[in-house]
């Protein structure tokens, strides 16, 4: 097969999974300051000492601090999830119900949208990943997501072969399925 051609769209689930996959592979730094701040806020009532020097928390008047601390922990941990962030961002991307056509060959790939197109050689791809449901190709500027449901078995095999035939991607590649 000289060229693989298929039409596809990127759903919210595809977008979320590809961003989570990329984030895990690139080991994106996570900042734990907000959840740790929540733990500190919860600890404040327990720092009160009575006249004998023993811990004497007044929990009845400290419930706003405890609730605030729990909320900081919850929202802080949730904001660390790439899947959550991608789900929140997807509606603003304009990808919903947009059709794309991909042309993939040994030279590279061309993706055509309604108003634009992107053409990359394989040398421009920094990271190629495969999950159970999609392929993700990352160029450093863009993330291309090809859901497997849009490809037949012959196209899946050909795409795996094209990815495997490339010299090592700087970010690595792990054909798994």
Image (spheres, rainbow, N blue to C red):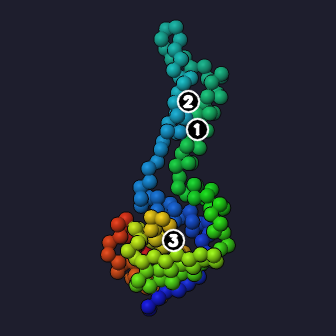
Q: Residue 33, how many percent across, how many down?
A: 49, 39
Identify the mark at residue 144; answer none if there is no mark. 3
Q: Residue 28, how many percent across, how many down?
A: 44, 54
Mark 1: give few (<14), some (14-19) or many (20+) Cα within 10 Å: many
Q: Contact (CB < 8 A) between labels 3 and 2?
A: no
Circle 2 sits in a helix, a strand or a loop, which is it?
Answer: helix
Residues at marks 1 and 2, CA–CA distance in whole angstroms: 9 Å
Mark 3: give few (<14), some (14-19) or many (20+) Cα within 10 Å: some
Residue at 44% x, 64% y is 140
Q: Which corner quadrant of the image does residue 97 belong to?
A: bottom right
Mark 2: give few (<14), some (14-19) or many (20+) Cα within 10 Å: many
Above/below status of 52 relative to 137: above
Q: Which corner quadrant of the image does residue 169 belong to?
A: bottom left
Residue closest to the eye, 112 or 147? 112
Q: Residue furthest front?
A: 116
Precedes in sequence: disc 1 or disc 2:
2
Identify the mark at residue 41; answer none if there is no mark. 2
Q: Residue furthest left?
A: 167
Q: Contact (CB < 8 A) between labels 1 and 2?
A: yes
Residue 116 visible in rendering: yes
Q: Nearer the viewer, mark 3 or mark 1?
A: 3
Above/below status of 27 relative to 173: above
Q: Residue 128, how many percent across, how many down?
A: 42, 70
């Amino acid at each position: 097969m000289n060229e693989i051609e298929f039409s596809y769209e990127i759903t919210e689930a595809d977008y979320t999974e590809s961003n989570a996959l990329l984030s895990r592979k690139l080991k994106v730094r996570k900042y734990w300051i907000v959840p740790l701040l929540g733990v500190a806020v919860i600890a404040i009532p327990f720092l009160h000492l009575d006249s004998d020097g023993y811990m004497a928390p007044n929990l009845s008047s400290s419930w706003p601090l405890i609730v605030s601390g729990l909320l900081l922990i919850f929202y802080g941990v949730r904001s660390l999830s790439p899947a959550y962030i991608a789900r929140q961002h997807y509606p603003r991307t304009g990808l919903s119900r947009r059709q794309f056509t991909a042309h993939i060959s040994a030279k590279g790939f061309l993706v055509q949208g309604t108003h634009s197109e992107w053409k990359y050689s394989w040398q421009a791809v920094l990271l190629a990943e495969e999950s159970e449901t999609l392929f993700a190709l990352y160029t450093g500027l863009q993330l291309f997501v090809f859901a497997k449901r849009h490809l037949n078995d012959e196209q899946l095999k050909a795409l795996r072969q094209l990815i495997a035939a490339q010299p090592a991607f700087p970010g690595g590649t792990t054909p798994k399925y």
